Amino acid sequence: MSPKFWIITAIAIVMLSACTAADDSTSTSGSPSDVVQSAAQAYVDGFNNRDLTQFKTYFATDTQGADPAGLAQTLDAAEKTMKTAEDNDQFQLHDFQITTEETDQQNKLSTVHYTANVSIVRNQDLVVFSGNIEQDVALTKVGDKWLISGGDAPQITSDQVVPTSEP
């Protein structure tokens, strides 16, 4: 797989722009920071189990205030990344820090800034991607739940990308 593939993988994991509706089994009733952290872990779990169903529950729909343009782009990238990964590829979240949270309770809006150190490991020992990601994530409160409604483009610093034979 090309180095571009791994960069897209990292973007898909944390590019938390609008995607799909929340369900009652998702931990979206905590603080906006709790929701962003839970969504990040849900992506890791979903990628490693090749099932993003739980990850998708952290996002608002366009009718709930999400950015419709990011809806398909984000989910398509997340699904494509997962489906094109090799069977033995595992996503690892080494460090995840919420650095700021600004919440406007009156308007039911919040912005959370995070940094993450991630890698993709093949066959438990070959690091094929390693990098740092930083992003602002927008959330909206729908009922008593915070849902991700968009976000800035993530800033990705790649520490390591293993070259492949693909062009």
Image (cartoon, grey):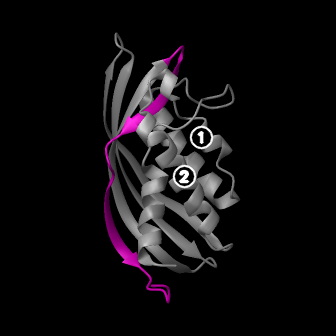
Say if residue 146 shows up in the picture. no
**Secondary structure category for the residue under label 1:** helix
Question: Residue 7: which quarter of the image?
Answer: bottom left
Which of the two residues, 19 or 88, is positioned nearer the viewer here? 19
**Secondary structure category for the residue under label 2:** helix
Q: Can you give x and y, in whole percent of width and height, for residue 88 in the image?
A: 66, 74
Amino acid of disc 2: Asp
Q: Find the magenta span and give its range.
A: 142-167
Examine the rendered structure and indicate whether residue 167 appears above or below residue 83. Answer: below
Examine the rendered structure and indicate whether residue 98 appears above or below residue 4. Answer: above
Amino acid of disc 1: Lys
Examine the rendered structure and indicate whether residue 123 appears above or below residue 152. Answer: below
For image coordinates 46% across by 19% down, the residue present is: 141
For image coordinates 35% across by 35% down, the residue present is: 112
- Disc 1 target residue: 56
- Determine the CA span between mark 1 and mark 2: 11 Å
Neighbour tally class for label 1: few under 14, some 14-19, many 20 plus, Cα within 10 Å? many
For image coordinates 38% across by 77% down, the residue present is: 160
For image coordinates 47% across by 67% down, the residue present is: 119
Q: Can you give x and y, in whole percent of width and height, for residue 142 in the image?
A: 51, 18
Q: Within the magenta stretch, is there residue 149?
A: yes
Instruction: Check if mark 1's residue and mark 2's residue have beta carbons within 8 Å.
Output: no
Neighbour tally class for label 2: few under 14, some 14-19, many 20 plus, Cα within 10 Å? some
Q: Can you give x and y, in whole percent of width and height, for residue 138 in the image?
A: 37, 33
Q: Can you give x and y, in whole percent of width and height, for residue 60 in the image?
A: 51, 29
The circle drawn on residue 76 is 2
Question: Residue 80: which quarter of the image?
Answer: bottom right
Which of the two residues, 39 or 167, is positioned nearer the viewer here? 167
Q: Within the magenta stretch, is there residue 90?
A: no
